[in-house]
Image (cartoon, rainbow, N blue to C red):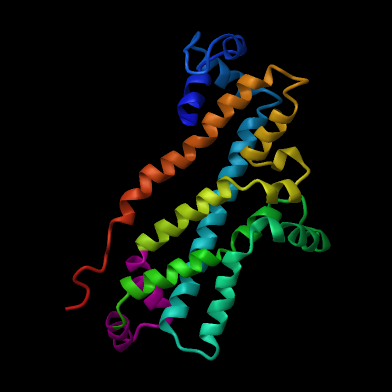
Amino acid sequence: MPLTWLLVNATKNNGDLFGRPGFALGDFSLFTNLADMFTYQGSVFGRWLANSLLYSVVGSVGSTLLALLAGYAFDKYPFPGKEKLYGLVLLGILVPHTVVSLPMYLMASDIGLANTYWSVLIPSLVNPFGVYLARVFSEGYVPAETLEAARLDGASELRIFRSVALPMLSPAFVTIFLFSFTASWNSFFLPLVMLNDSSLYPVGLGLFNWNAVLPQEPHYYAFVVTGSLVSVLPLAVAFLALQRHWRSGLTAGAVK
């Protein structure tokens, strides 16, 4: 129902937003709202949207690759203190991101990264839950016999991971990527702490700032509602485009 309300009200102008019931259609003004929103304040909304794509896509790809490497190593390689180190990684799942945002800001400020793209991108690379999922997927999708066969053929460990294990882990890659992408796209408190330059804001933080001045700037109502609808679309597109990979397994028949 909230999504339906959002879809209906994004088509209204400010007068219809207040003059008609929430689920009742008014004059169709969606394209006018979009045009006004994307040209307002020097097209700042488009900049926020691009920032969110940068934070989410780059951060999610990086965190997914790191999680797959770590989970694969925890599963396939013996080394001293492996389970204790893995338990330490799992403890990271129990720590809310808001708790560590202020310490991360102080660290970023000390090294001169505060109020930069890096202050949001670097923390997004750490994904303890992704490491857990990657180890579970590696246990189920990557047979040890296949890796041993690759070693007998003379492949290096890096080549084995890149050419043998990574294709088998493609469902894990998509799953972890979607979790990371959703978390990065919806991230609010970390950018709020790290950034004070509005040109670096992600779309969620930008809409929050518009929403905060609604009593003084009522014409922002249509912008906030329409912008909220636009901000949902990339998540829907990513899910619809990648969901089929969740059900695909590339290891069927890999081991006789």
The location of residue 253, given as percent across then percent down, is 18, 71
Is residue 18 visible to us here?
Answer: yes
Magenta residue span: 145-169
Quarter of the image where the C terminus is located: bottom left
The location of residue 184, given as percent across then percent down, is 57, 50
Left or right of 34, for residue 142? left
For image coordinates 32% across by 72% down, the residue present is 140
**Location of residue 214 by image quarter:** top right
Left or right of 114, for residue 54? left
Image position of 248 with respect to 163: above or below: above
The location of residue 165, given as percent across then percent down, is 36, 72
Can residue 162 be found in the magenta stretch?
yes
Query: Is 149 or 203 nearer to us in this picture?
Result: 203
Query: Is 90 or 68 nearer to us in this picture?
Result: 90
Q: Residue furthest left?
A: 256
Query: Is 83 or 232 nearer to us in this picture?
Result: 83
Image position of 44 with respect to 90: above or below: above
Q: Residue furthest right?
A: 110
Can residue 28 be found in the magenta stretch?
no
For image coordinates 50% across by 8% down, the residue present is 27
The location of residue 25, given as percent across then percent down, is 47, 12
Left or right of 52, for residue 237? left
**Location of residue 84 by image quarter:** bottom right
Left or right of 119, for residue 94? left
